[in-house]
Image (spheres, helix red, strand yellow):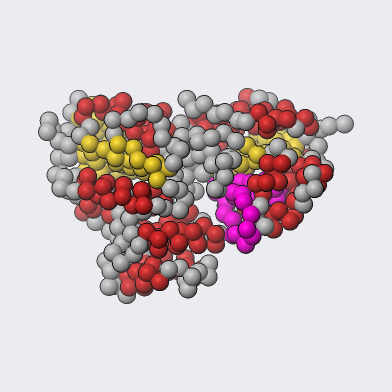
């Protein structure tokens, strides 16, 4: 089980201390439910004729090779579970995880690289991974373990591109407000390993994928940019994303040139549905945002809250989502709808931030700060934004928990919530008032959770 340790500073706000402890228990239960090691261990088992993965048995001849590869913030924990299940049947392996997400010793090579902007360590690992699966036969098996963050952790530029081109394009997409599906549509077409190209390199071997999804709806091609599955998108789709966010002329010339040449047919497309590389392959999603949201809701009910799991498709601008969630809190406080007090509303998904300022924060912190301003003065109400991987944006916080006193506490400290929000600078304000959630890396990643908790009405 995942040991989610929430910094005690979060509970020092006396007005909502009980709600904050209840929320911490809900988040702990949610992260437990998507524990990467446990989910992977459940999905792999020895079979009389080979191995059972994701509910399907794969025969293994005596001399068949079993290669384990993967990428993502949870990949180190996933590979430990695979080792426990397959033991000496594993011939070789390599997975890449983010710095700080290594999960104990492993016989399979675990390398660390940069996230969310890719670096040379990730590029080197991707090249090594392609070499590892090259030359396999039809009796061999490749087990691919993917989780959130995999796209940035396997950055292998197409010919004519540099890693700097990919990094700058990723950074522009992150700051533009593009969602993860749009970002990965672009990244697949700049990559030499994503969009089914790892499976094509491993052919004719069987390629079986276990995925912990951090993408809304879990489209296979979007998870870690789909290195082992068919890519239904095109170079034209990738160009359309750049046009949609007005960054076509801002991306590096090399990236724009690759996409334009691909659209003209001068560069081969990524492998599409029906390609022979996927004939013997399969993907199974073993944990996702809905799993975590349901666990949080179950914990809320057990704690005595009237509970509603509202949606796991929360997306759009983080500050807009925060105001909407604050509006739901106000509705509950005023009318008892959509749930009577004590109430808990659970949402999941992943919002985005269009960065126009120069501050520091993450999407969950921005959601929370926007919500705090809209909840100002509400009694015994809490709004939580939480990144399930334990890292919200480029910060050491997993998110924030705000209440009806947050804005007033900030103002007493000489901080202006509106100014901090305009400058995308939620982190220092929330840190100053003690509303940041700090957990450290959780070892999993299924996007974000948002909680609205309304305790009994205060007098």
Decide: is 212 above or below 152: above
Q: What is the total number of numbered labels drawn onto the structure image?
A: 0
Give the camera-side residue of 357 and 179.
357
- What residue sits 66% from the left and 52% below the top? 425
Q: Position of residue 203 (x, y in %)?
A: 19, 49
Point out residue 451 in the picture as x, y percentages from the top left corner. Answer: 64, 39
Report the span colored magenta: 348-371
Residue 76: image quadrant is top left
The outermost residue toward the right is: 459
Q: Position of residue 70 (x, y in %)?
A: 33, 42
Please report the residue visible at 23 percent of the width from the left and 53 percent of the height from the top.
200
Could you say which quadrant of the image residue 14 lies in? top right
Question: Position of 103 compared to 403: left or right?
Answer: left
Q: Is residue 359 magenta?
A: yes
Q: Residue at the spot x=18%, y=28% of the render?
A: 49
Q: Position of residue 230 (x, y in %)?
A: 31, 54
Kindly identify the residue that appears in the image at 30 percent across and 54 percent down.
193
Residue 289 in the figure: left or right of residue 187: right
Q: Residue 392: in sight, yes or no? A: yes
Q: Is residue 218 visible?
A: no
Snapshot quadrant of residue 439:
top right
Q: Is residue 374 magenta?
A: no
> In what quadrant of the picture does the C terminus appear?
top right
Front residue of 184 and 3: 3
Q: Is residue 18 above or below residue 134?
A: above
């Amino acid at each position: 089980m995942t040991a989610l340790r929430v910094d005690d500073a979060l509970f020092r706000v006396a007005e909502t201390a009980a709600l904050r402890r209840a929320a911490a228990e809900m988040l702990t239960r949610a992260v437990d439910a998507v524990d990467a090691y446990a989910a992977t261990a459940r999905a792999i088992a020895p079979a009389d004729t080979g191995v059972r993965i994701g509910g399907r048995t794969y025969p293994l001849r005596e001399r068949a090779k079993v290669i384990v590869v993967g990428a993502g913030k949870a990949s180190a924990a996933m590979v430990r579970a695979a080792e426990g299940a397959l033991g000496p049947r594993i011939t070789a392996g390599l997975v890449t995880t983010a710095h700080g997400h290594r999960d104990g010793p492993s016989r399979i090579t675990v390398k660390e690289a940069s996230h969310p902007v890719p670096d040379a360590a990730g590029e080197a690992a991707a090249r090594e991974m392609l070499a590892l699966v090259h030359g396999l036969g039809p009796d061999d098996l490749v087990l691919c373990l993917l989780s959130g963050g995999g796209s940035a952790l396997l950055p292998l530029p197409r010919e004519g591109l540099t890693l700097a081109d990919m990094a700058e394009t990723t950074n522009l997409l992150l700051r533009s407000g593009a969602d993860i599906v749009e970002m990965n549509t672009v990244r697949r077409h700049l990559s030499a390993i994503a969009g089914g190209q790892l499976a094509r390199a491993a052919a004719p071997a069987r390629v079986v994928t276990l995925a912990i999804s951090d993408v809304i709806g879990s489209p296979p091609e979007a998870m870690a940019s789909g290195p082992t599955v068919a890519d239904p998108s095109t170079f034209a789709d990738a160009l359309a994303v750049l046009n949609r966010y007005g960054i076509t002329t801002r991306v590096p010339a090399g990236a724009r040139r690759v996409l334009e040449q691909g659209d003209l047919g001068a560069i081969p497309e990524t492998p599409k549905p029906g390609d022979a590389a996927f004939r013997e392959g399969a993907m199974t999603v073993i944990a996702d945002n809905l799993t975590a949201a349901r666990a949080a809701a179950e914990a809320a009910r057990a704690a005595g809250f009237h509970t509603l799991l509202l949606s796991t498709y929360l997306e759009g601008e983080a500050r807009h989502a925060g105001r909407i969630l604050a509006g739901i809190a106000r509705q509950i406080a005023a009318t008892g709808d959509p749930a009577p007090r004590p109430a808990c509303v659970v949402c999941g998904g992943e919002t985005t931030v269009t960065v126009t300022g120069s501050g520091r924060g993450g999407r969950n912190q921005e959601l929370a700060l926007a919500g705090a301003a809209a909840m100002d003065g509400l009694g015994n109400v809490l709004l939580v934004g939480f990144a399930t991987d334990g890292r919200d944006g480029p910060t050491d916080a997993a998110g924030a928990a705000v209440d009806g006193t947050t804005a007033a506490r900030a103002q007493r400290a000489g901080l202006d919530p509106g100014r901090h929000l305009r400058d995308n600078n939620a982190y220092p304000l929330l840190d100053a008032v003690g509303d940041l959630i700090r957990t450290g890396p959780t070892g999993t990643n299924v996007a974000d959770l948002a909680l609205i908790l309304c305790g009994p009405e205060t007098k």
